[in-house]
Image (tube, rainbow, N blue to C red):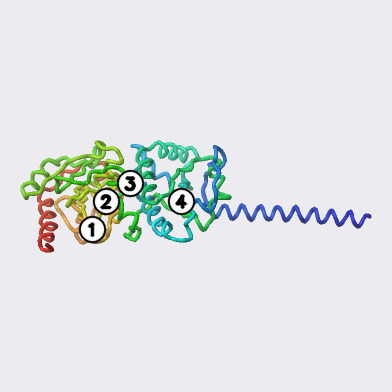
Amino acid sequence: MVCIFHALTVLLFLSVISGIDVFRTSLNNFSKSIGQTSSWHVLLNGTAPHFVPATTSCFVVENSRYLLNSNGFQIGHWGSVLTKILGSLDKSVSSSSHVLLQRVCVLFTDSVASGKRLRSVEETAALSEYMISTFGVLKVLTGLDFELVRSGPEKNSLTTTCYEDNTLFVDAGSFPTDDRWIGRLASSVPKVMSEHFKCNQSTTDDILIYNRQGSRRIVNERDISRVLQGKGLTTKIITPNELSPLEQICEMTKKRKMIITPHGGHQGTFLFKREGVAVVVVSPNSALLECYRFFAKRSDPWYSIRAERAWSCPDLCSSNQHAFFDPSCDDGSKCKRLARREDIDVSLAAVERIAAMHFGSERRRS
């Protein structure tokens, strides 16, 4: 009898130890799947829907603090996230192994930001008309429902709904270094905007001067327009502030010859740009600013202007010999910080060189 009692006690002890090991293994696996973050408490409160794992794919956005700046939601960094989502889904939606996929969940994490800061990013993003609009466009493009999963049990549900084979980690702090993300989905945006969002893609202007308000504003936009009109090119001047997010995307899909714009987060909309439309990015005199080159196809004409210099950018603009000309300051963080606060008086001689460079080669091709 005593032997039986001891045997039962040993079995009970072993089962408890085994249960702890299973729990630890599950916790470790979950830690790997969600990524390391200092804000584990973001997974602990809210209301969660019930997901069927086979129908749900998750994008975990790391370094999400970059999605919030002093002006609110950061469109440029959100555009960077979207390039990675679109590039991944371009393969998924055409794969027979993803025929059950119905929903895409986007979750924010950050290993540096506090829990309070991360919740602020989530709240700003959830209220952002730009995020809502881009999710709407992606839904039509892919046939999938997109949802920002905020702090709470929705994130807890990752333990049972998002596994490593259908979870992708994307970095909000990095930008594409090539154009391989561009596929069928990105190429079909103009058609989607026309058919589903009533975007009138007929234009009467050759060139859009896509200016901005606040820092890095082009102050001589009218002079640029007069120079171009003198060459027989019609122009239109607008800023993103005048347009709704869907109207901004619509402008990017129109059949123009060229877009001239200062460097800034408004270029996040360029990932929806119609293929073949040339882009001229103007940097302040203090420093060359770039990161959006591969929001467009490598084959799309892309130019850079800084001070009196103007050059073509088949790859990154900074890889060109014309990019840097002040050894005491070029490519320095101090000068880049200064440049981000500058307005831009664009060199008209540089604009004329770009026009000759682009439209001269265009005539030769025709």
Foreground: 242 or 290?
242
Residue 76 tag number: 3
Q: CA distance from mark 4 to mark 2?
A: 23 Å
Name the residue rendered at 67%, 55% in the picture.
22
Occupied quadrant, residue 241: top left
x and y percent of residue 184 in the render?
33, 58
Relative to 299, residue 76 above or below: above
Q: Which one is in front in this view, the residue at disc 3 or the one at disc 1?
A: 1
Name the residue rendered at 39%, 51% in the picture.
142
N-terminal of the pair, mark 4 or mark 2, is: 4
For label 3, count other residues whose C-alpha is less than 10 Å away and answer few (under 14), some (14-19) or many (20+): many
x and y percent of residue 64 in the render?
43, 46
Q: Which residue is mark 2?
A: 273
Q: Secondary structure at mark 3?
A: helix
Q: Which residue is mark 1?
A: 300
Residue at the outermost right position = 1
* CB atoms of marks 4 and 3 within 8 Å: no
Q: Which residue is mark 4?
A: 59
For label 4, count other residues whose C-alpha is less than 10 Å away and answer few (under 14), some (14-19) or many (20+): many
Name which residue type carries label 2: Lys
